[in-house]
Amino acid sequence: MVINDAKWLMRVAIALMWWVSALLPLIPSVHQRAMHELSLVGLTGALALTFKGIAMLLDLACGVGALWLHRSWVWWAQMLVVLVYTVILSVSHMQLWLDPFGALLKNIPIIALMIYMARTEKGA
């Protein structure tokens, strides 16, 4: 019972992380910052908007998968998304590894949690 309760809490926490990440760019100031950051890596105009929109949809889908799709492949896919985001940010904004709030460092326990969830799900 305790393990199932803990897994439910982990699902909700990860889903919320994905959903908040997906919806934050709807705030005008966050949207402007995202567009500025994308311009620094060469994405501007419609291409930047498309990239941001795809990332938002992907984050929403990951949140849905975390909460309702109890399959190991869902967690491996989410881990891949986190790894891709981490690599992109490591190349474009390496200083995020030194951020005092742990901007990229937080991805390490998130990936560990996703590995645990994947290994304890159906189809593991």
Image: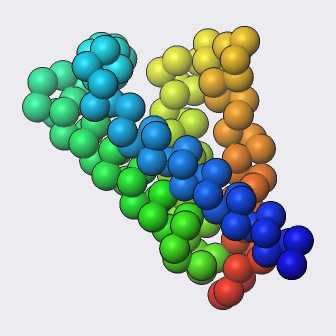
Q: Position of residue 121 (x, y in %)?
A: 70, 79
- Which of the 4 image quarters holds residue 26? top left
Q: Residue at point 46% right, 40% down?
A: 20
- Which of the 4 image quarters holds residue 115? bottom right
**Which of the pair 92/53 is nearer the observer?**
53
Q: Residue at point 67% right, 13% down?
A: 99
Quadrant (top left/top right/bottom left/bottom right) for the N terminus: bottom right
* Image: 56 above or below 90: below
Q: Position of residue 30 (x, y in %)?
A: 35, 20
**Which of the pair 64/44 is nearer the observer?**
64
Is residue 66 left or right of 40 when viewed as pictured?
right
* Image: 96 above or below 87: above
Quadrant (top left/top right/bottom left/bottom right) for the C terminus: bottom right
Q: Residue at point 33% right, 44% down?
A: 56
**Which of the pair 92/100 is nearer the observer?**
100
Q: Position of residue 67 (x, y in %)?
A: 55, 67
Is residue 91 left or right of 48 when viewed as pictured?
right
- Which of the 4 image quarters holds residue 102? top right
Residue 48 appearing in the image: yes
Q: Residue at point 52% right, 28% down?
A: 89
* Image: 19 above or below 42: below
Q: Position of residue 92 (x, y in %)?
A: 48, 21
